[in-house]
Amino acid sequence: IMLPKPNESVHTYYSTQAGEIKTIALADTSEIILGPKSKISTSISDIDRSVDLISGEAFFDVAKDRQKPFFVTSDNVSVEVVGTQFNVQKIGNAVSVAVLEGIVNVFGQGGKDSQSATVPAVVLTAGQKVIKARDLAFESVLAVPSSDLAAWRLGRLIYRDISLADVVADAGRYFEGKILLQSDELADEKITVTLRTDQIDQLPQMLAQTLPLQVQVVSDDIILLKPQPGLENGD
């Protein structure tokens, strides 16, 4: 019988379907709330606590252990905490980290092994958020209301001055179909919108009320957003 070696990490993968939210209890009593269409891998042992957010979004409630920091990585962003509550979201080529409680060290390149001895690029405290696109520097630290951080876990989506492409990509995790954008001009349009997750199928019509676009239903599960006639060339 093969027994695990002492201190050997056990890697576990978790994923969710469209619209599904899953609560994961880790061996160290930390808790992860995994958002829809999301995927993570965890590695928890006597000497190691780390999670890789492969896609989607997750909220972390980390049990405090000063001897064993908790690491989260996603793309080229690495997060280090001792014990705190924070949210990590991956949309397109950007990763955002937002803190509900405690202090979070955020690093820009490499994994936890190379980062743990270096100075963090950003230190976040409660009510703060930072975003990093894959090939760019960290953006300025933003203030984020605690109600925003809890929103998606309570069935509400809040987007503030976010590109339409990112809104469509993130909201798309809550339903089976696809919303497609026909032009780059539409994709880059910055919008602010709030809706319930059970209203996702109404999102295209809500967008059409405030943006110069038309909604075309291609099939039962594909919706195309097109510029209004005469606006295709940015007129």
Image (tube, helix red, strand yellow):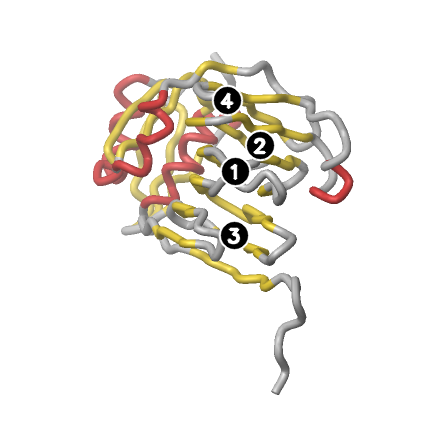
User: In terms of image quadrants, where is residue 158?
Assistant: top left
Q: Amino acid at mark 1?
A: Lys
* Residue at figure coordinates x 22%, y 36% from the top left: 199
Q: CA distance from mark 3 to mark 1?
A: 12 Å
Q: Which residue is mark 2?
A: 94
Q: Residues within 10 Å of mark 1 (few under 14, many from 20)?
A: many
* Residue at figure coordinates x 37%, y 55% from the top left: 17
Q: Residues within 10 Å of mark 3 (few under 14, many from 20)?
A: many
Q: Amino acid at mark 4?
A: Lys
At numbered mark 1, what does the secondary structure look like: helix, strand or loop? strand
Q: Which residue is mark 1?
A: 90
Towards the viewer: 147 or 49: 49
Q: Which residue is mark 3?
A: 40
Is residue 139 visible in the rendered image? The answer is yes
Q: Amino acid at mark 2?
A: Ala
Towards the viewer: 113 or 170: 113
